Image (cartoon, rainbow, N blue to C red):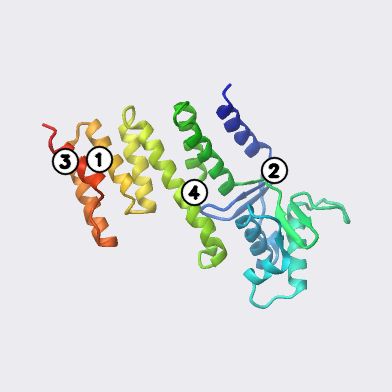
Amino acid sequence: MSDFLQQLNHLNSFYNNATIRIETLGNFIVWRNQEKIDNKEWGRDKTIQLLQYLVSHRKKNALHKEKIMDNLWEDWNDRDFKVAMHGINKVLEPERLSRTEPEYIIRQGVSYQIDLEKVWIDAEVLEKYIIIGNQSFVSEKEVAKLAYQKAIEIYKGSYLPNRIYEDWTSEEREKSQLLILGAYITLAELLIDTNPIESIRLAQNALNIDAAWEDAYRIQMQAYIVKGNRPQAIKTYMKCEVILEEEYGISPLPETKNLLKKIEEIH
């Protein structure tokens, strides 16, 4: 078994075995022992906000308590943080003995972070699947396809849609969107010759996220040519041209124009 396939299997196993799973893409859902945690268990919204903040900044070093509060709440006091952190630990570990260290939230003095070895987070795993896909793209295309497909399965929509106006979510939202757009396009490229209809569908999914994503139009144009549908390929270019003009006041890239020329020369 190749190293890339082992990595893929490890991620699949992590999903099945993780006691705590957190979904952030398209909705916010936390699972404990395969059961969905009811919103009522969280009690206060500040508890959920604090967990979401820790998820959004999971890759940084342990976060200082005061910095977290400054970014989360305009009017705060130490008690707010203690109550919210206690609420997180109580929900994630309802049977934890008092005076024992939490298992999923690592505390270092007055700094905190999520233990990514123990907590499955969809946005984190999405990136890992795509990294496997990118790294295996040249040498193991079948593994790359599987990795991109798994990433696409995970992506169910925008990152934390209920916090769309919070500054601390924007970086993660933009990153996950770029990652999934890349996954759609790269998988579509891999499938053009063998399954052009699927390539068209995948490219359309990318366009549903960003209507001006030019790579997706080129994929569709190429896929229609593979299917022998020259008129639809040309129509796709025209649609691309209109959208780019409406959205940004620009024309398609030379790469896209050159593809159109090649298509027009086909008899």
Q: Are marks 3 and 4 in contact (CB under 8 Å)?
A: no
Residue 117 has which mark?
2
Amino acid, disc 4: Lys
- Tell which circle, 2 or 4, labels the residue nearer the N-terminal end: 2
Q: Which residue is rendered at x = 56% and y = 27% of the image?
A: 5
Pointer 1: what residue?
221
Tell me where residue 186 appears, x and y as whole percent: 40, 38
> In 3D space, how far apart are the residues under numbered discs 2 and 3 (Cα atoms)?
51 Å
Q: Which residue is rendered at x = 11% and y = 31% of the image?
A: 267
Pointer 3: what residue?
261
Residue 165 has which mark?
none
Residue 156 has which mark?
4
Tell me where residue 240 appears, x and y as whole percent: 25, 51
> In 3D space, how far apart are the residues under numbered discs 1 and 3 (Cα atoms)?
12 Å
Amino acid, disc 2: Glu
Instruction: Give the number of the mark in front: 4 or 1.
Output: 1
- Tell which circle, 1 or 2, labels the residue nearer the N-terminal end: 2
> Which residue in the rendered view is the most extreme toward the left?
267
Amino acid, disc 3: Lys
> In 3D space, how far apart are the residues under numbered discs 4 and 1 (Cα atoms)?
26 Å
Tell me where residue 180 appears, x and y as whole percent: 45, 46
Q: Are marks 1 and 3 in contact (CB under 8 Å)?
A: no
